[in-house]
Image (cartoon, rainbow, N blue to C red):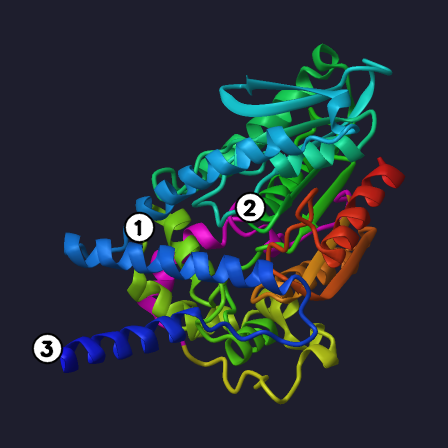
Amino acid sequence: MRLSTAMFVLVGGVYLGITLYVPMPTDMDAKMEFYLKTIGFKFSKLIMYLEYLVRGGSTIDFSVVQNIMICITTVYRVGAALTRNSEGSKFTLDDTTFDGVRVLFYQRTDGRQENRPAFIFLHGGGLTIGSVDIYEMVTDDIAGHLDGMVVISVDYRLAPEHPFPAAYDDGLAVTKWLMRHADVYGVDATRIALGGDSAGAYLTAAIVQAIHDNPTLPNVRLQVHLFPWLQHFDYQTPSYQKNAHIFGERTWVENTIPGFCFSAYFNGVLNDSLVEQMTTNNHTSAAFKNSALYWKTFNHSLIPKDFRDPAYYTPPQSSDFGNEEIWNELKDVVLDTRFSPILREDMRGLPKAYIATCGYDPIRDDGIFYFHRLKDAGVDVFWVDYDAAFHSLDWYYPLYSETGKQLQRGFINFIKDNI
């Protein structure tokens, strides 16, 4: 009995040690934040897979993680109420709807109440988690710093319950509503900026393009992309390879996570067999990999040389492979620029852009690829990389690190200087 107990304690201790170990690059900022997010993700993932085994399903049910997020939402909403600083107290916050979509509407209680610029924010979360409530501290902080501007946070529908194009439709509906009713809200329709982080940056890119193509609406003034998630075609970019080399599965954004989120948004099914194909780029056809659009968009030579360290990076060895059956199932949706705005052929005339990427982020290169697409089309675009940061580094009061503070100041000043 004592031996079995000792073995149980030993095995349990080893398992716990393995679970709690997270690699920490020496130059990474906000290490404790990264560690806590990673451990939280690991335990959420464990609960999700245990539920999957008990249920005996063929696909993973993301509702477990969403229920965990509901608990986190409560904490964040309380935190938002407690941490509103003196500058933040100068705005009012209304929970309302625009064209049937829930939004948080921020405006100043003093100063000018008409012809004001506005910033529409679209939260991240892989289109599967997140909400305006979870992001309330974020948007409080944005509203507090964008003095005299209206700020709107969009609570778009989430996958897998609401697959493509639900999130896109909601974000577009809010933007069109504000533009068409700008006078009602004291907003100048020609001075509206859009922005978001991660998946919210994808929505920003797609919505900006749709507004640009609508002759009845003014162009969006600015677009802001924070560590953007913008492509579903190359899961062997230098940043994906770097992430796998340093962290493997010991990070809160494993290389498989974008694939699972893609699967949920694509058709509302979390398909682990599809994700497995995606991690090796076997989900796209050889013909597409050899197309001019693919090479123009996802050529690894676009990534700075010092971001392609031979210690972890191996260039593509071949493009003559791919599962035609999978590609035929995916292509009609993934080639739609509402789903993949990075594939738009003509980027000319799109609004001035700000792109921020993070060094420890598997999707870092998505932002670099989009930077080059915009720049090559003559769009005025600024890109900055925070090499010591990781994906979704906290960049809002009171949780931000020094790098997070720099990221916040960067895009806030960009909006102020150009709106």
Residue found at x 54% / y 72%: 240
Q: Tell me, yes or no, if residue 132 can be seen here.
A: no
Q: Secondary structure at mark 1?
A: loop
Q: Hey, which residue is sitting farthest right in the picture?
A: 417
Label 2 or label 3, whichever comes before in sequence order: 3
The residue tagged with tag 2: helix, strand or loop? loop
Q: Is residue 134 visible?
A: yes
Q: Residues within 10 Å of mark 3 (few under 14, many from 20)?
A: few
Amino acid at the residue labelled 2: Gly
Callout 1, which amino acid? Val
Crowd class of label 2 (few under 14; some 14 to 19; many from 20; radius 10 Å): many
Q: CA distance from mark 3 to mark 1?
A: 46 Å
Image-based side of 288 in relation to 89, left or right = left
Rendering coords of residue 404 (x, y %) = 72, 54
Location of the N terminus (image quadrant): bottom left
- x then y, percent, for residue 153: 61, 31
Which residue position holds label 2? 124
Mark 3 or mark 1: which is in front? 3
- Mark 3 lies on residue: 1
- Based on the displayed image, in which of its 4 quarters is residue 172 positioned? top right
From the viewer's side, name the closer residue of 34 and 145: 34
State which tag comes first along the sequence, 2 or 1: 2
Report the magenta residues as a range. 322-351
Q: CA distance from mark 2 to mark 1?
A: 19 Å
Instruction: Note whether 129 is above or below 18 in the view shown.
Output: above
- The residue drawn where x is 71% and y is 36% is 141
Residue 306 locus on image (x, y percent): 73, 80
